[in-house]
């Protein structure tokens, strides 16, 4: 079974051609070609490329360019704007885009602060379901609002980003109790219309590589949700200041806390099913 990273962000350098909305503590560039090279080094076959909201907001044109160049390696996801009265038309057009597999909304208190009954969110949830798209949703630090949104739309499939647990952008930013919200995340598993990304998990470790202290909480999460509803991912390059790409992949390949069948499902099978996409033309990796 192929290995699929459920969340990566590639991007160009900050130039007038495609200027960044903000300047995070990321490398000056991690292009699509560079992302493919990093994946090849550790044996990752494909990835779900999410257009970086902090850099490009609702413009997914770079993701489209990269997917066009590497169609066998990337599926793409676009953030959509709840404040746009024509967001339904945006979703309909995105559905026609080769490689597009979902849309994304931001519900963190820092980035959006949206109420779960926001009319724009309702519109997105309905239109995504109508077009057969799941909705990726980031609501770490805002779990109650995210849970309410999921419950408001039982016919929409939601894929919860980053275990709904706040993750640091630097090692010094790690919370004193990084897994404090885990009980709420386990309770979310009762929602049959939700899946969850086990992405960025290595950034929550208090110990150096290979981050052994992540496994007790991850096992609890997998046992509550069922491995077939859990999608492994690195969240690279957002995680780059805490772990490099190889460090975000290898612990999952080598741990004895996963059986072979669990590893195959977590690191590829569940993602392929959730998005209806698998990498192909893998000979490209060696060209």
Image (cartoon, grey):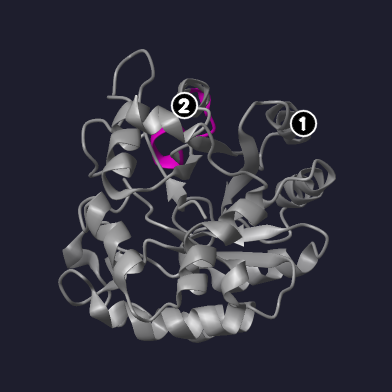
Q: Which residue is mark 1?
A: 92
Mark 2 → mark 1, Cα distance in angstroms: 23 Å
Q: Quadrant of the C terminus?
A: top left
Q: Secondary structure at mark 2?
A: loop
Helix or strand or loop: what does disc 1 sit on? helix
Tell whether 174 sits left or right of 155: left
Q: Quadrant of residue 21?
A: top left
Whether residue 49 sits left or right of residue 27 in the image: it is right
Q: Which residue is mark 2?
A: 70
Sequence-wise, the earlier of marks 2 and 1 is 2
- Name the residue rendered at 17%, 66% in the picture: 172
In the foreground, 278 or 88: 278
Vertical order, 230 against 34 (above or below): below
Report whether 111 appears left or right of 79: left
Tell me where residue 29 appears, x and y as whole percent.
26, 30
Q: Is residue 257 above or below residue 42?
A: below
Image coords of residue 19 (percent x, y): 36, 22
């Amino acid at each position: 079974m192929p290995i699929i990273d459920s969340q990566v962000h590639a991007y160009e350098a900050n130039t007038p051609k495609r200027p960044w909305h903000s300047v995070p503590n990321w490398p000056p560039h991690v292009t699509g070609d560079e992302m493919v090279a990093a994946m090849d080094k550790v044996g990752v076959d494909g990835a779900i490329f999410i257009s970086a909201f902090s850099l490009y907001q609702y413009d997914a044109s770079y993701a489209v360019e990269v997917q066009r160049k590497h169609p066998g390696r990337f599926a793409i996801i676009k953030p959509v704007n709840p404040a746009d009265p024509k967001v339904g038309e945006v979703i309909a057009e995105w559905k026609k885009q080769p490689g597009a597999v979902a849309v994304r909304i931001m519900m963190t208190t820092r980035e959006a602060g949206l109420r779960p009954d926001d009319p724009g969110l309702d519109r997105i949830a309905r239109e995504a379901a109508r077009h057969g798209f799941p909705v990726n949703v980031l609501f770490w630090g805002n779990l109650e609002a995210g849970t309410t949104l999921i419950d408001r739309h039982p016919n929409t499939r939601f894929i919860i980003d980053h275990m709904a647990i706040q993750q640091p952008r630097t090692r010094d930013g790690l919370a004193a109790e990084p897994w404090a919200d885990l009980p709420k995340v386990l309770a979310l598993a009762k929602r049959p219309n939700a899946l969850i990304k086990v992405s960025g998990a290595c950034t929550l470790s208090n110990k150096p590589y290979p981050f052994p202290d992540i496994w007790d909480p991850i096992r609890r999460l997998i046992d509550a949700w069922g491995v077939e509803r859990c999608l492994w991912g690195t969240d690279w390059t957002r995680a780059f200041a805490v772990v490099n790409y190889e460090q975000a992949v290898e612990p999952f390949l080598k741990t004895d806390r996963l059986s072979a069948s669990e590893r195959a499902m977590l690191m590829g099978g569940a993602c392929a099913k959730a998005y209806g996409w698998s990498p192909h033309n893998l000979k490209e990796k060696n060209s």
